[in-house]
Image: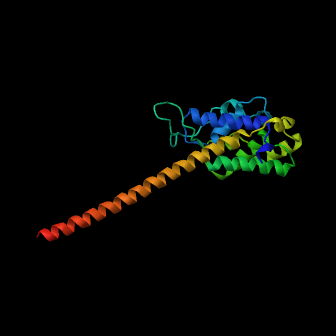
Amino acid sequence: MFQRFNVQAREAIERAWNKACKLQHAAVEPEHLLASLAEDGESSFCSLLSAFAVPAARLSQVAPGPGAPAQHAAGSGQSSGQVLFAPQTRQVIEYAVEEADRLGHKRVGTSHFLLALLRSALERPGGARVLLEMGLELEAVRARVRELGGEEGGGKADVIPAVLFFELDRRAREAEAALRERIAALESEQRSLRAMLELVSERLARLEQRGR
């Protein structure tokens, strides 16, 4: 699926991930993606905003609340890499693919992300709702994308050997799985210690009874 994303769409995902890391957020939220999309003035995303008289500069400043901080490597100020893609962001990416399919486009690009963010904004509160507040309507934007046809940079997508989003997300999932395994191991040790303490308490109680 991710091979269908064109260069500008992948770069937007990379910028969104970098934003979350820089802000020390634990997850990449739709607002990170929205802000990163608005930074590329040459993209179809920004062209659509211009067509509807929406200033991209305002959207580039959108950011989610701090939420839970990202984990950091010991003794450093850098994120340890455990920055995940929030469920809502995954859904936006899925919506972008659905929108491309709906319109019969082979490539998934930034215009499809705009449609996906509008769908997400209609379903949940958050920074992406600023699109609705600025007067954008899903059906109107979808009709304009249909008129424009395919996405920008379609031919370039095949020459990229790896999908950045997939790789980053895979690494984050591995880190999350490793963390869960460690937590499970610690909980197992805790149960063992509790059992040992109960056994010691029982033996002490028997010794006290014998000494009476």
Q: Residue 203 placed where, x, y %?
A: 24, 66
Residue 77 vs residue 142: left or right?
Answer: left
Q: Residue 84 placed where, x, y %?
A: 60, 44
Q: How many marks?
A: 0
Residue 30 vs residue 82: left or right?
Answer: right
Above-or-below relation of 75 to 83: above
Q: Residue at x 77, y 34 (%)?
A: 8
Residue 25 picture quarter: top right
Which quadrant would the C terminus be assigned to in this image? bottom left
Name the residue nearer the viewer: 136 or 211: 211
Residue 138 vs residue 63: left or right?
Answer: right
**Observer able to see residue 88:** yes
The chosen color scheme is: rainbow
Q: Residue at x 57, y 38 (%)?
A: 81
**Observer able to see residue 85:** no
Q: Residue furthest left?
A: 212
Name the residue nearer the viewer: 133 or 89: 89
Q: Residue 79 placed where, x, y %?
A: 54, 35
Q: Residue at x 27, y 62 (%)?
A: 200
Q: Residue 75 placed where, x, y %?
A: 46, 31
